[in-house]
Image (cartoon, grey):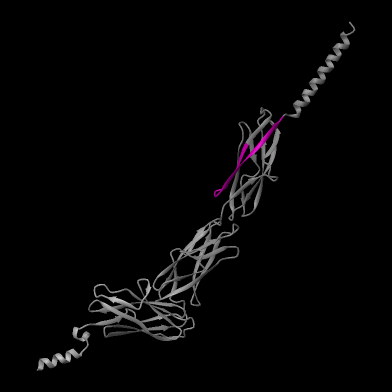
Amino acid sequence: MALAFVMTILSAASPAVILGASLSLDTPYPAVEAAAGGKVSLTLNVRTDAARRVDLAVTSVPKGWGASLHGGGFLIGSVTADPKAPPDIKLEVKIPDDAATGTYRIVVRATSSGLSSSLPVDIRIAEATGGGLSFTTDFPQLQGPSSTTFTFNLTLNNDSPADVTYTLNATGPDGWQVSAKPASQSQAASATVTAGSTSAVTVTATPPSSAAAGSYPIAVQAMANGQPVNQALAVEITGEFKLDLSTPDQRLSTHGVAGSATQQQFVVQNTGSAPLTGVKLTATPPTNWKVTFDQPSVDIAANDKATVTATIVPSGDAVAGDYVISVTATAEQANQSQDLRFTVETSTTWAIIGIGLIVITLGALGWVFRRFGRR
């Protein structure tokens, strides 16, 4: 009779109790902090003693908030729980932009065959901050000439438990072209960095060609949840060295007489952004020609110029025609060469002598005809 009484009591109990069934719902992070306007993504664990279907539902959500359950790329309402292969479940919470400071509770409930388990999740909204975001970069300062486009690679770190959407802005000195874009999509106006993850950001800075040597600041800002996250960068312009060599009228040709001196001016211009010191002019003339310059060397400031006069003496036996003289301006940092075409002309002295000989010859012939013509 005692045994029958015990069996009667057990038969009245639920099958789950009889079989020793268990069901629990938990998360590694039951209380987190987030920012207004952000998102929270939490992993949920459903634990059972045996494989069975478990129904899931969000039973309590603050007014104006959004909460949903995800698994396998779907919105879900049930899972098949297996002790050997627990299902992957995410609780996604969207926090409204106007959420006030305080702690809010969301409750998720799991039920299966008369068993149930409730999981309260507390989300604390703190004072408005950058959402746990911060910038890092391996090279906050780059160096080069003004003709270079500088590229910085930054990492935006999201150390908060919420996904954060951010926008980027970058500024530089007057005349500079500066931009900041998410590295994954250069045309995107905004991007999202998931909770506990990072986002790559590319910043480009192009200085004007006239930028002088010196240090220039670049400011980068990410706006997240209405708060700025700043990163200071810098570009060191080393100065660009360029030389231009020509003549005052831009014509690279002249003329003269063999054996006589001809003067030709050359204009040496510093078209770079840094000064040039000790600029020397040298020439490579034809054989037996002489070329000298009135200044052994000159110093030229950035965007300035100097005029140097060359004295060219062709060889005395140079025949009439065109010759090439190669002229080079050389500094320690830059050099430039130009070819000057020199036309050797026939000397007027020989022309006068020739005319004189003709006159003398004609006079002699006239005298001969007058003297001997009567005979």
Snapshot quadrant of residue 80: bottom left
Snapshot quadrant of residue 280: top right
Kindly identify the residue that appears in the image at 86 percent across and 11 percent down: 369
Q: Is residue 203 visible?
A: yes
Kindly identify the residue that appears in the image at 22 percent across and 87 percent down: 14
**Quick check: 113 above or below 234?**
below
Residue 239 point in image, percent of width and height: 56, 56
Q: In the image, is residue 334 part of the stretch drawn in magenta?
A: yes
Q: Is residue 337 left or right of residue 104?
A: right
Magenta stretch: helix, strand or loop mostly: strand
Residue 345 point in image, percent of width and height: 71, 31
Observer-nearest residue: 298 or 32? 32
Q: Is residue 30 visible?
A: no
Q: Which residues are magenta?
A: 325-345
- Rendered-image quadrant of the C terminus: top right
Q: In the image, is residue 213 part of the stretch drawn in magenta?
A: no
